[in-house]
Amino acid sequence: MITFVIALNTFREAVRDKILYVLVAFGILLILVSKAIGFVSFGQDFKIMADMGLTAIWMFSGMVSIFVGTGLIYKEIDKRSIYTILSKPTERWQFLLGKYFGLALTTLVNMAFLSTAFFLYMWLSGAPVTIAMCQALFLTFVEMLVITAVAIFFSSASTPILSAIFTTIIFFFGQLTKFIVDLATVLKGSVDSPEAKARADFVGGLLYKLYLVLPNLHNFNIRLDAVHADPGEWIHTREMLPVTVYGLAYAAAVLMLAHLVFARRNF
Amino acid sequence: MANSSSDSAIRTAGLGMTYSPGLFQPTKVGLQNLDLEVPKGSIYGYLGQNGAGKTTTIKILTGLQFSTTGSAWIFGGDVRNSATRKSIGFMPENPYFYEYLSADETLDFYGKLSGMDRTSRKRRTDELLTEFGLNHARTINMRNYSKGMRQRLGLAQAMLHSPPLVILDEPMSGLDPMGRRDVRNAILKLRDNGQTVFFSSHILGDVEEICDRVCVLNQGKKVAEGPIASLLEHKIIEVKLAFTGVATEGNPVVVKLATRQWHDGVQYHVLVDSEEKAAQITDLLQKNGAVLRAMIPHKESLEEYFVRVTMADGGAGPEYASRTKA
């Protein structure tokens, strides 16, 4: 109940903050601009529109998660509004989880707005709206749940600027995990001398550990396949559930880490 | 761990707190071996200079900080247990609320956190907003509230669920005289309802006026504690005399006995530190033809007591000490 109250309050605060509307407006603008770019691509205009639309929704949802999420806990501590909340019969994990769900709800509503604008625009332009696009948007939302958890983790331990930097780095490198693990394999197999091999093994090992720690956000990106799918066609049917479970488990693990940090803090 | 002494609203035993300000910096002591006992139904003043450990104690009691040694209980329940905080209403110093919420929404939010049902939340919100004169501004966002209005809303949220213990950190800070009077009245009303109030303040006149007991803290240590009436010395510590007719300045007896004397253009004023000296000077001057216009005895105030015990503990810095001597 308390988690729900805090979540709803976080959502209410977020939707009344003008910064959210600016981000949504920019997102819608980018969706609209996609048609202009589509005009110059012969015969591919609908695909360009779909690709740009899905990417705009992903990018602006990511921005909301990062920029709202990284300031969320810190602002409570800095402004001292946390004093009146934690002095109530509230557990710290309830506060943290409430903040997380509040931001997740904000992201969901933000994505719903952008997706509605995107689908409406596609439909008005005579472009097909496909099931695969909905699948892509669903996985984008799961990805945002992961990024929101990462943002909350850093926000519970650091300043908004540092948190935003760290979360952005993870957001960026999380897209490249596939290349990181490939690089580790290539490194290990690319040298002959024992010394160089030892160094390559060491660096390769580090890269592999990095791959294990970073969220594999590449898994959530089925946007390109969604753009090329036929209307009514389901894509990646086997991967949808495991990828969703992976995202939720990763977010839960990060939130548990955040709780470990947050539960010991003195305010 | 429950505490058998649940006759107290607050009890601490050996409470201590050390801080590490940063890497390579020496550890700081915030609180040292603090034993407190706040009786139920009392108004308890918690006094100390800036940095004496008042807010640290309050934060430990409200679950915002964790003590490094010792324990604290509220109505017998360990303060580390969140359920214990059901009995507390807390207002921090300079309270801050969510900018985009109105007073109605803010109180509704805190009411939900305190486990109140919808009807009680609505009723108490109406009562408290009326009591604190915020009814006209109940739909305005917090960002448009003045400091005094936030302070009053802070009190309202602390009292919302009618907790048996209300903890206030500097509740009079930054308020105008009318605002201070409202806060004093609100605190007295809480005691009349049988609730306990524990508050820190620098405004010692207010503390003296409304508190039953006080505790003076210096550098994290308790240096005095008890009912105000028993702490303050009842003997006359200063007498102010006012004469006309004869100049007191230059009189060798007055110079010898007075701690201070001055002429305001109409009357000659003499300050002495005992009733005996006042009688000696009065006799002498009246024999010389002076007319006694006023004799005002002065007992020790809480502020003077506070300075005395703090100085005796060596807590006041040299700058503060020289100022008080002057």
Image: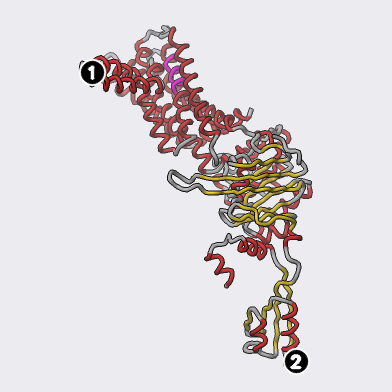
Residue B287: numbered disc: 2
**Element class at badge 2:** helix
Residue A91: x %, y % from top left: 61, 32
Which one is in front, A25 or B274?
Answer: B274
Which residue appears at 70% of the width and 67% of the height?
B300
Residue B101 among magenta residues: no
Query: Quick check: A60 above or below B297?
Result: above
**Element class at badge 1:** helix
| Amino acid at the residue labelled 2 | Lys
Side of A172 where A135 appears, left or right: right
Q: Which region shows up in magenta?
A: A135-143
Which residue appears at 70% of the width and 34% of the height?
B116
Side of A198 where A161 appears, left or right: right
Q: Residues within 10 Å of mark 2 (few under 14, many from 20)?
A: few
State the residue position of label 1: A194
Residue B132: x %, y % from top left: 68, 49
Side of B213 where A175 appears, left or right: left
Residue A100: numbered disc: none
